[in-house]
Amino acid sequence: MIPLTTPGLTLAAQLATINRLCPTDPAQNRLVYTPTWTAAQAQLITWGLAAGLQATVDDFGTVYLDLPGQDDQTIATGSHMDTVVNGGRYDGLYGIIAGFQAITTLHRQLGRPQHTLRLIAFSEEEGSRFPLTFTGSKHYARQTVETRMVDADGTSFEEARQLAVAPLQDHPGVHSGLPALPASFTELHIEQGPRLTQTHQQVGIVTGLVGQRRFTLTLKGRANHAGTTPMADRHDALQAAVTLITRLRHHAQALDDALTFTVGRFEVVPNSANVIPGLVRFTVDCRHPSDLVLTEFERQLHQAAHALMAPQLTITIQRWVHDLPVCFDQRLTTQNQRLAAQLNLRTRRLTSGAGHDSGIMSSVVPTAMLFVPSVAGISHAPAELTAPTDLAHGVALLTASLRVQAYGGLA
């Protein structure tokens, strides 16, 4: 088995170094283009240059560290540097540091690869500061990114981007520009769920990402006095919303046990203790590996809403997210499964219930994804934790996968 550390800082020490850049440890706040995000990207550049890698920063702040190969083909790995607000220590960052460990280990042991090895630290994935996700990988994938947006403080995306990216591109030894797309991309990530820990598996072989649909439902009834309006004469938008949500949850459970259903935002107007609610607005998030299942649930959602409507109660439905399911490259997925068996790692094939940069990359290049367990399935929170042995297993498998892809040989 390939060793898990390189000369200098270990995996754990590199993770800790980046995480200590946030002032509220253990909660991580590396929102895109903030000082902690900039410091983290700068630290990665420093490590990369010291390891003999070539550094490039694109105009969105994504960092690329290349170990040049003998031809013009590139094998890439990486993840995102940003976090959610008060996030965990591993989400995104683990895939970056693990990729750095894998590439530098291969360089030290095997020398120059046949194909260039590239580590990517995407600028943004979470959508925690600006109302758009995956801007880093979308830019790299040559997708159009809407940049006319502001954060909660009124700072524009363009202003924040320019202030944060310029110092990175001006870093001594750094090139600026957008590198060519790789021949493949592999992302290593924590699972962010309980399936691996519940089944005592060491690595997840991710076959794809679920499809997602999100809706905003607006129920308009009639506001009136809480004490003087008889129960039979009410047009209570909140009571109708509660009934509708209960029915939708039942439909979701009956349709498929892999279908997730979430009401995440809820607004009541006028939101007063002595007034019958006249308007309610809430969101519905549903996810499943099959778009056909999501289509059927959407049909049932409209049917359930229509059944509740009355002359004094109207319901409107706006669908504002329709992300199709993603299937990862079968050849890479099968190859990673064989490599895991050679490393005597217990694996489980699964679909990710969350979106990832790999979903964007899979639209332009063959892509694979690997998971390591999250203790208790917790993520996006300071309690996020993965055992050191599981972190090491992920690095070992990623290293083996990059070795086969960049240096040749059979899996």
Image: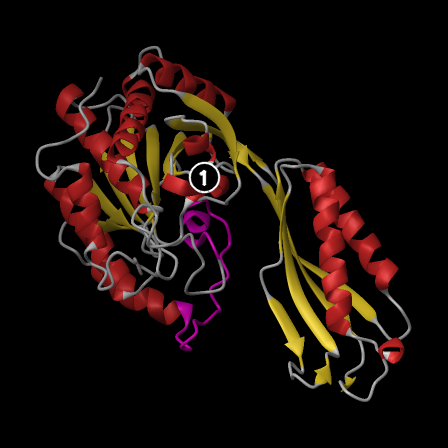
Secondary structure that dominates the magenta span: loop
Q: Nearer the viewer, residue 410 or 59?
A: 410
* Res. 302 image quadrant: bottom right
Image height of 32 relative to 149, above or below:
above
Relative image position of residue 56 (x, y in whole percent): 25, 47
Q: Which residues are magenta?
A: 133-157
Q: Amino acid at mark 1?
A: Ser
Q: For the view shown, which residue lies furthest in the right direction?
A: 311
Q: Nearer the viewer, residue 406 or 313?
A: 313
Q: Is residue 174 visible?
A: no
* Res. 155 image quadrant: bottom left
Q: Residue at x 42, y 38 (%)?
A: 191
To which residue does mark 1 refer?
358
Q: Nearer the viewer, residue 247 or 362?
A: 247
Image height of 281 relative to 359, above or below:
below
- For the C terminus, the image quarter is top left
